[in-house]
Amino acid sequence: MLRRLLRAPEGRDGEPSACLLDSQTVNTSANVPRTDQGIDAGERITGRKRHLGTDTLGLLLTVAATAAGVSDAAADRLLLTPIAAAHPRIRKAWADAGYRTTAIDHGVAPGVDVQLVPRPSGRRGFAVIPRRWTIERTFGRLMHHRRLARDSSSVIWAG
């Protein structure tokens, strides 16, 4: 209901028809058991990975938490399945190259066209990438909250 109230002033339908998928690796605190953690080799971070699905305004549709070593390609089902079930109107999803063909293949069953939005070739450092900047902004907003900047829970939640 809150999402519908926030989408209306933006001139959007209450129920989204497109979404964005991405992940963020966060450090864990010292009190998290090693069995619940992993190493994200690309980011060189020991911790957990947040997988988010948002609408095109950056409002959360689903969240899944895994060990940091779980690749985006392996976690796409944790995002697409609940999004397709809860939001049957969604027919388009944008994701980064980490989701590769597995997300595209998994999106076929519920009728979601997953399109990869790669980084510009030869570009290093920060770059605003069309479509993906919305979900990156959501990650930035999460990091402004002290308790979300570092993962300290010992429970992995997916839903």
Image (cartoon, grey):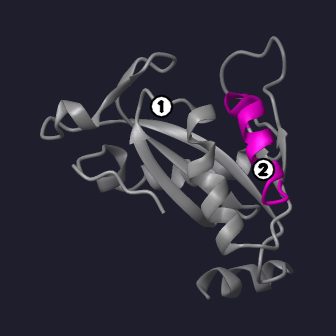
Q: Is residue 7 magenta?
A: no
> What residue is at 30 percent from the left and 45 percent from the top?
151
Query: Whole-Å distance between the Cαs marked 2 and 1?
Result: 19 Å
Q: Secondary structure at mark 2?
A: helix
* Image: 141 above or below 51: below
Q: Is residue 65 rendered to the left or right of residue 124? A: left
Q: Is residue 99 rendered to the left or right of residue 111? A: left
- x, y (%) of residue 99? 69, 34
* Image: 94 above or below 71: below
Q: Which residues are magenta?
A: 96-112
Residue type, label 1: Val
Q: How many marks?
A: 2
Q: Quadrant of the N terminus?
A: bottom right
- x, y (%) of residue 13? 84, 81
Residue at the limit of the structure toward the top, as seen here: 122
* Image: 86 above or below 126: below
Residue at the limit of the structure toward the front, as seen here: 109
Q: Which residue is mark 2?
A: 107
Dot 2 crowding, Cα within 10 Å, few <14, some 14–19, many 20+: many
Q: Quadrant of residue 17?
A: bottom right
> What residue is at 38 percent from the left and 23 percent from the top?
45
> What residue is at 78 percent from the left and 60 percent from the top?
110
Q: Which residue is mark 1?
A: 70
- x, y (%) of residue 60? 59, 65
- Nearer-N-terminus badge (2/1): 1
Nearest the viewer among 124 and 62 is 62
Q: Is residue 102 rendered to the left or right of residue 91? A: left
Q: Secondary structure at mark 1?
A: loop
- x, y (%) of residue 120? 84, 23
